[in-house]
Image (cartoon, grey):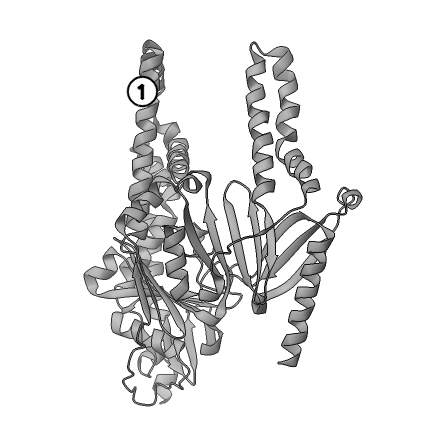
Amino acid sequence: MTKLQNWPEWMKTTMSNWKKLHATSIPITFITRVKEFIIPLFLSFFAGGAGSSFSFSRWLFPAILLSLFIYSVVYWLSFRYRMEDDELRIKQGILVKKNRFIRKDRVQSVDITTGIVHRLFGVCKVKIETAGGGTEPEVELVSISLTEAESLKRRLGNGERTDDSKEEQEEEPFTSTFRYRVPGRLIVASGLTSGKVGLVFSAAAALLSQVDQFIPQQFYEKTVGTLVAFSTAALIIIFLTIAVVAWGISVIITFFQYGNFEISKTEQELTIERGILERRQLTLQLERITSVRYVTNPIRQLFGMWAIYVDSAGGGSKEENLSTILLPLGTKKDISYVMEHLLPEAQFPDHINKLPKVAARRYIFRTSILWWVLAVPFLFWVPNGWLYLLVPIFFTYFGWQRYKDSGCLFNDAHCILQTRHVNLSCNVLPKRRIQSLTNSQSLFQEPKKLYSLSAQILATSGGKTFLIKDIDERQRDDAVDWYIGNLRSSKNE
């Protein structure tokens, strides 16, 4: 026992009932870190190849790679976990040791992901989110077996006591009460209308800015000369071709990200599975969903198509703005069918109480005033500047549309706030999940007796606020009475 006490902590834990990550976590962690350091690695590679003489820069690229590999090995050696007394306990670190204790009643979601490398070895990555955990998962198990992942998910998701010192008993899995698979045509339609083509152009521009210094000046001169030689029609065809290719790439990205999208429901949980190359399985507690959002953009709205997002105190992803996508795309009929089985109390509302007419001018003013101001110099100093008037006229119409689409509704169980920026969002907030409801009035709203209303809920980022501007006194009073009644009923319960 004395000899064991003199050993390093990570070696002692291997002798106990602590569990370690699968050995594949070493290459997986290494690949992940390389992706994070891709730009420094890229620059160090070219810096090292710039000269043939012995120099620091020549060894910079392999030194960074070696450091990342050593970090991956040390991470695997020092990381240990186990379930004990309804807690997930984690030890990690050699120089700086960290101990984490996560009670199962604080777990908001369990996210199981299997990438290409994971599938080769029959392992997966597990992310565990807790309430108020922020944008990063509370715990990330880089590589564990699928059996162990399912065991963790089951033991963190139900209410039974667990202890590694006791023999683990086999539990019957929860039976799904509803299962829905999103058709492939809707996934493709989601990619065509998602707006990710802008992200493709942004990524291309970012990459070009990094490699710009390595491209010879002669290449730019020849390229510009070639483009100038083309006719206007040829240039239009070239740019349209580039746009179509970027659009196609965005569809492919969406298809790989959301392909084989499947939703299942048990009595207590929602499970969302999606992805072609990287398969993701996210489990959310039904009782901890804090909002349901129906979202559409102008193109989707033309075809009556909507996407559904849910917020909870954990489980959101960065690519979905820290929310969880429940349905990538569907018609009103599709979303009505899905929500009737998943969350019938949060159905899309049949109607919404519109804003007062006096609010229309404020919406139009806020949306278009900047463009009207910019129109003045165009009219006086730019040839055919009157054509620029089409821009503020468009934004004037868009401001009117924002006013028409906005509104609110309060029923027994929910507060519904509908707003439009570019996308139209109908936000259904469960009464019990609203942390605070605030009404305010600015100096500009006071003469018209208008108010702003905001509702705050718990979300992955810690908190999310929904705001609607320019409601009238009656709507404000309805909101206050509704929320005060909510507080009283909660106290009585």
Residue toward you, 352 or 151: 352
Residue at (33, 72) in percent of width and height: 177
Give the side of residue 46 with respect to residue 401, left or right.
left
Picture quadrant of residue 74:
bottom left
> Type of residue at label 1?
Ile
Q: Position of residue 463 (x, y in %)?
A: 57, 60
Where disc 1 sits, the SS reads helix
Residue toward you, 100 or 286: 286
In the rendered image, the quadrant that contains the C terminus is: bottom right
Tell me if I can see residue 268 in this picture: yes
Mark 1 nearby-residue class (10 Å; few <14, some 14–19, many ≥20)? few
Q: Is residue 134 above or below residue 422?
A: below
Q: Is residue 36 above or below residue 460?
A: above
In the rendered image, the quadrant that contains the N terminus is: bottom left
Residue toward you, 433 or 135: 433
Q: Position of residue 137 (x, y in %)?
A: 44, 63
**Residue farthest toward the front in the current orientation of the protein:** 350
Give the side of residue 86 with respect to residue 441, left or right.
left
Count of residue discs: 1
**Residue farthest toward the left in the current orientation of the protein:** 120
Q: Position of residue 389 (x, y in %)?
A: 58, 20
Q: Is residue 279 above or below residue 300?
A: below
Q: Which residue is mark 1?
A: 237
Residue at (29, 78) in percent of width and height: 173
Tell me if I can see residue 97 in this picture: no
Q: Position of residue 449 (x, y in %)?
A: 77, 47
